[in-house]
Image: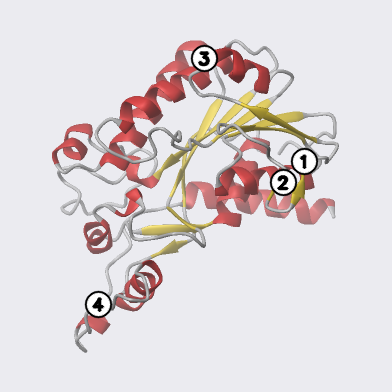
Amino acid sequence: MASPDNARAVCVMDASGHLGSALVHLLLHRGYTVHAAVQHHGEFQSFGGLPCSNEKLRVFHADLFDYHSLTNALEGCCGLFYCFEPPSDHSTYDEFMAEVEVRAAHNVLEACARTDTVEKVVFTSSVTAVIWNEGRNTSSTDLNERNWSDVNFCKKFKLWHALSKTLAEKSAWALAMDRGINMVTINAGLLMTPDLTITNPYLKGAAEMYEDGVFVTVDLRFVADAHISVFEDISAYGRYLCFNHAINCSHDADKLAHMLLPSSHSTPPQSSNDKRIMYQQRISNKKLNNVMMECENEQLLTN
């Protein structure tokens, strides 16, 4: 397990979203110099209360379709944490978002390939790039990092978030292997943030995910810790399914539904039989848990 060096700089792109902002905070706390690359133009005074005057924080305006701005943000960095945020002129996940996200991923990985100092990329993907295929509810084995969502299945059922994440991640892997980039991906569950609503594109097909035992969520701190753990672990490789809660019983499903729906709406009453529903979890995050356990043990030994 590598340890952060106070002189080491890393880039977080896009740093303006929930995950990006959390990564900026944690990386600064761990002693890194952070290049916070944000897409949207304007004055950024803070990241969740963190003053931009922090001596280890540099803020860059990075357009995912402007190659020069990407290389500027990456200059001098040993690593990149890449978490796609939809651009302001195309903020809705639709049938065209996949093209936008694939282009962005390609541009960012190409910029990394041409930046001599970049040693590792942590690419944020999604569980939706893993779980969707024709045989989704017939397999008896757990889904893991070897599974990929089927592109044609996603198109057929208009699962645009899954389509975008699958194609973007595959494009990133193809370029990383072609250009010799050391990359790992975090395939995250539904990110639990205070502003989460029923309109979140991840939730398309939520009922099917629930019934299939693959509806998983992740807390912001957990997913941010996971990113840093796989970055600092020199033996980390490939994809990592990332979640810390599974929605597989009616109690948890009702609780989530009440959180997602506005107070003016009410969910239909559940029968006593419904309350006993429990679906078997069919997705495994064992690979990530092993890395995070090793990270925790090392921190205990060094404290």
The disc, 1 or 4, on the residue closer to the chain's N-terminal end is 1
Q: Identify the residue position indicated by label 1 in the image.
A: 52
Q: Nearer the viewer, mark 4 or mark 2?
A: 2
Quadrant housing residue 147: top left
Instruction: Give whichever of discs 3 and 4 has the lower sequence position.
Output: 3
Report the residue at 63% width, 16% height from top. 71
User: Which residue is labeled 2 in the image?
Assistant: 46
Which amino acid type is marked by label 3?
Glu
Q: Which residue is denoted by mark 3 in the rendering?
A: 110
The quadrant where residue 211 appears:
bottom left
Q: CA distance from mark 1 to mark 4?
A: 49 Å
Q: Which residue is drawn at the image coordinates 57% and 23% (left, top)?
A: 182
How far apart marks 3 and 4 lie (CA) works out to: 48 Å
The reply to whether the C-beta atoms of the residues labelled 1 and 2 are less than 8 Å apart is yes
Q: Secondary structure at mark 3?
A: helix
- Which quarter of the image is occupied by the C terminus? bottom right
Residue at the disc numbered 4:
277
In front of the other: 125 or 257: 257
The local crowd at label 1, few if under 14, some if 14 to 19, many if 20 or more residues have their Cα within 10 Å, is some
- Relative to 196, 118 lies left or right: right
- For marks 4 and 2, give the CA distance: 45 Å
Task: Give the percent coordinates (x, y) of residue 5.
Answer: 82, 33
